[in-house]
Amino acid sequence: MEIRAAKAHERDEIVDLISAVFVEKCRPRYASQHYHDSTYELDQSRVCIVDGKIVSYVRVSNRSMYIGEVVVKLGGIGMVVTLPEYRGRGYASALLRDAITYMEAQNYDLSLLFTTIQPFYMPLGWAAFPQTTFELELHDKKTFASLGWKSRQFDIESDLIQISQIYDESNRGRTGTVLRSEELWRDGYSQQVGMLPSLVIEKDGQIGAYANLAFPDDDQGIDAYLATYYPNLREVGCRSANPDSLLALCHAILEAAYERDVESISGRLPRHHPMTLLLSEESGSPLSFSIHERMMYRVISLGRLFQKLIPKFEAELASSGMADRSGSFHFTVGDQDCTLNVNQGKVAVTTNGSGSTKVKLDTYHFLKVLFGDATFGQLEEFNRIKGVNLQPDEIALLSVLFPKDEPTHWICDYF
């Protein structure tokens, strides 16, 4: 067995392997990930060679992601495949361990993957994290008064600059969202995987909002994976200066559904995103939500992650009225540990094993507080049962450092 980075001449063999193991009709998507992704580099492709051929494969996508206003380096794990006749021998696990070593060497902070076989990845350090999908049943068709905005189809040549600006503005500081460069917006990969929006709201040449919206017939012939697995509403963005354009976008989405006589709309938006709330209010129908945990994160470097988060920690302290509080918290997460020292509004990170208050968390619950899915106050009883005994003033301080949030990972940023 040989594990290493792929070589240039092996890309066709890699695409053949993925297509054979997964779904042949998705071959254009797999090829695009290796030939048309502007972020792709050969050493991101990790291969396992047995009997002179590639029998197992893992891809690491290079991305950057927001946690609040802080940008962290994210390694997206995808295309984990092994030929059927070579399974059960540990090749995929060995490749994932190699990918972890690669991400450590490349100074990644976190890793993210999507899967339906969570138990396979858990022993390697990944832990599940929830995603919310809404469904809106449509009943009586509504009519809406004009708000002065025009809805039309997206045009890549005339609209992309404004769309990328709106995306940046809408997602700066939105935990879980991925930064997108101009190259990523324009490359063949983004178009293959359906990253580009379909609908824009415009007034006097100014785009106020956009949606990545599609119904089953819209996706035919574009991307088999997209058409099969993605919900209708995949992404929205709006200029903060034009909040009424989001309402106009909501009306356009509902009108598009009415025109197709569809019975419901589904989407991957947070529960309290303004578009989620608007769709329910404007349609006159209640929403239903489902939560699944097919997203999994792994902490690559706890110390480096905390170092990057210092500005966020200090900003949270300054805005909370608790800048005069102090505390020293020794975090242990999996096999990693480091200490957060809080003193008079300033935060320092050390890796010397110090810290008067011990905070030992499994990765699953650490991710919940890191991304704001839960606070230390909400986990108080669970932590106490697990032997993490925090005093009320310590819980209050940690809940400021790790506040409640609604993380968002747009579905077209899957790997």
Image (spheres, rainbow, N blue to C red):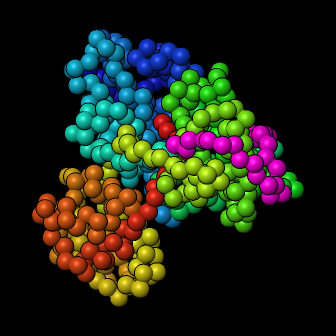
Q: Which residue appears at 25% of the width and 40% of the height?
A: 122
Residue that protrudes farthest toward the right in the picture: 204
138 in magenta: yes
106 in magenta: no
Q: Quadrant of the N terminus?
A: top left
Q: Nearer the viewer, residue 286 or 167?
A: 286
Q: From the viewer's perspective, is 299 left or right of 142?
A: left
Residue 38 falls in image quadrant: top right
Q: Which residue appears at 43% of the width and 75% of the height?
A: 316
Q: Nearer the viewer, residue 283 or 347?
A: 283
- What kind of secondary structure does the magenta stretch mostly adopt? loop
- Look at the image and tell me whether residue 227 can be seen: yes
Residue 186 falls in image quadrant: top right
Q: Nearer the viewer, residue 71 or 276?
A: 276
Vertical placement of residue 115 versus 328, above or below = above
Q: Nearer the viewer, residue 205 or 284?
A: 284
Q: From the viewer's perspective, is 148 left or right of 410?
A: right
Disc tally is 0
Vertical placement of residue 92 versus 244, above or below = above
- Look at the image and tell me whether residue 29 can be seen: no
Extent of the magenta region: 135-157
* Residue 49 screen position, x and y as percent: 33, 19
